[in-house]
Amino acid sequence: MASTIETTTLDCGMPLIVERIPGVASASLQWLIPAGAAHDPADRIGLSAILAELLMRGCGDLTSRALADELDRLGILRATEVGGQYLRLNATFVGTNASSCLPILTQMVRRPRFDTDALEPSRKLSLQSLAGLADSPAERAGVLLTQRHAAPPTNRSGLGTEEGLAAVTHADVLRAWERQCRPRGSILAIAGDVQLAPIATTLNGLLKDWSGSAPVISLGTPEARGTYHHESDESNQTHIYLAHEAPPESSPDAAMERMHNAVLSGGTSARLFTEVREKRALCYSVSASYASDKLYGRVVGYVGTTPDKAQQSLDVMLEQMNLACGPKASIENDELSRAKIGHKARLVSSGESTSARAATLASDWHKLGRARSLEELAGESEGVSLDALNAYARRRAMGPITIVTVGPAALKG
């Protein structure tokens, strides 16, 4: 029996997407709250990271310890995560216990305590996470790439900045949550052993006093896009990141781009792995991924290698990317077949995780205003023909390429 997706708009104005998945006992919730890093004030970048930490430190009449005990009693696995546009609350629980779990989860969002004595511990933990970048040059390179390539304010890291984290006050916390935590702008998705009607009835009762719309961010101009930047790091590795433009998810070319990227980096038989790692032994890791949003998209490439092979690794990666685009681009039938099989395998794997499905449903709603089933997603890739993909590749242009390297020596970008 196939899964079924149903949607509704709750009385408060928030969309609810529910996918009932036969044969699973769990259910996972993903709540997108428009309070991500892009919404932080320019002099308080990191406020969203502190909000995410504080959400776990008590709500309503429950102290931080009491909240943790109650979540454990109900068997709720939970986490918060800061993205560019959204702060995400993730929770997994036994599906038949949804009616018992939803009250505490909604209270965490609607009635967080934000105790004054919880601010400093939350700030310290956020600063520790930020400081961890010093020991992770690959992650640091990725953060730098986003800062330089993405349009502000979506180019911010969810970790914040040291200055921004230090400047956050208790009043800032209260003001930000009151401003951003609104039903119109939020998205709630649940996947697993659940049904829409009882979930909607429960949530309408729990959220009956919630109203309003969250402010919408405006995208600026990425001034460093298309440039090269190096950060010195005295280690025995060089980390290379690059980004170039790709279609948004709303584009009819999105499915083509997914297959095009899978030909480049869909597995160990894909072009980048074969040409950069296997044939030339230039690196220990190489990949490219397509990330799309409602209004924009990008391909992000990565190479991890040793300093003596870094320049050639970058050169070969760029060479392969250029060969896959433009009038002379040519994709073979076996490449497309492998790309489709790999894509389908990843879809099947994600379909076995209620958490992954809830995240995909919420993401789809943000990007497209609707949710896609696994069958639809599989059909999109299966519907890509070799002739159509080659036609797309030949008119495909990468646009400005932003490159960031972290390692002992700069490269020729």
Image: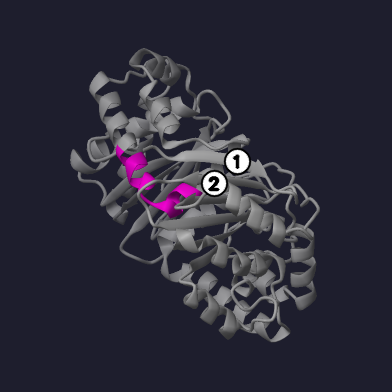
Q: Nearer the viewer, residue 354 or 99?
A: 99
Q: Which mark is residue 18?
A: 2
Q: Nearer the viewer, residue 323 or 3?
A: 3
By secondary structure, the bulk of the magenta-drawn segment is best described as helix
Is 222 drawn above or below residue 133 in the view shown? above
> What is the three-letter code of the residue carrying label 1?
Thr
Q: Nearer the viewer, residue 164 or 348?
A: 348
Residue 296, image x, y percentages: 59, 36
Q: Is residue 348 visible?
A: yes
Q: Which quarter of the rendered picture does the C terminus lie within?
A: top left
- The image quadrant of residue 67 is bottom right
Local secondary structure at mark 2: strand
> What is the three-letter code of the residue carrying label 2?
Val
Q: How many neighbours does mark 2 have within 10 angstroms: few (below 14), some (14-19), or many (20 or more)?
A: many
At 80% from the left and 67% from the top, the residue drawn is 175
- The image quadrant of residue 400 is top right
Q: Which mark is residue 7?
A: 1
Q: Are marks 1 and 2 in contact (CB under 8 Å)?
A: yes
Residue 109, image x, y percentages: 67, 65
Q: Would you say residue 246 sits in the magenta stretch?
A: no
Label 1 vs label 2: CA separation? 6 Å
At 41% from the left and 15% from the top, the residue drawn is 388
- The residue stretch that appears in magenta: 345-358
